[in-house]
Amino acid sequence: IDNQFFGEGYRSLFQSDQVAPNPFAMMRVNIWRLEYGLLYQVFNENNSLTKNRLWKFAATHYLSYNVTKNWNVGFIEAVFFQPKDGSFNRSFEVEYLNPLVFFRPQEYSLGSSDNVVLGLQTAYSHHSHTVYGQLLLDEFVLKEIRGRSRWWANKYGVQFGVKGKIRKMNYRVETNIMRPYVYAHINDG
């Protein structure tokens, strides 16, 4: 039971340590300049209206590549789902346990309303300074973005920051831009 954190920022757009610890299982494999990680999590929250505890699960794939000694690029894919889909009760989806599957096609094949999130992150370090960024895509329709319609379902976030040390003083300058409803989902859980 612990928190997970992805990225270099004070807060992460993907998973941050600013929340309550949760049960998880994790596996990481390092080969050459690549790191591949699997993360399975269980979340719960108390529903103040019904006084019930709502359970959610998450499965996350993480691929990190050290392009050079100073530059890292990472890709994250995660799916969040509930054990109840409408009137149908289900448990943890065993289809999401496959470490080599992309979640979006798997989610479509299940016919579920699960929420898939994609992300890209990068960091470049030089001496004692690091420039970093993250891009999070929750749901989007490229046609609507190009048309600048400001459609509510285009949900994404961007983070950009610089951190480092000058003599004995640490500094960090960071900005996060998030569209409304980025972490929201169709059901009340």
Image: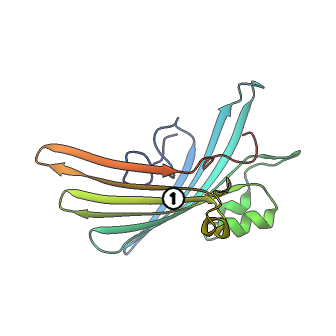
The amino acid type of the residue labelled 1 equals Met
Q: Is residue 133 left or right of residue 109?
A: left
Residue behind mark 1? 27
Residue 31: x and y, percent? 41, 73
Tell me if mark 1 has few (under 14), some (14-19) or many (20+) residues whose alpha carbon lies within 10 angstroms of its own: few
In depth, the one of 16 and 149 nearer the eye is 149
Q: Is residue 53 left or right of residue 137?
A: right
**Circle count:** 1
Could you tell me which residue is drawn at 30 percent across and 74 percent down? 68
Q: 75 above or below 2?
A: below
In depth, the one of 121 and 179 nearer the eye is 179
Q: Is residue 70 left or right of residue 150?
A: left
Residue 51: x and y, percent? 75, 24
Residue that extends furthest to the left in the rendered view of this protein: 167
In depth, the one of 169 and 75 nearer the eye is 169
Could you tell me which residue is drawn at 12 percent across and 43 percent down? 168
Q: 50 above or below 114?
A: above
Res 43 quadrant in image: top right
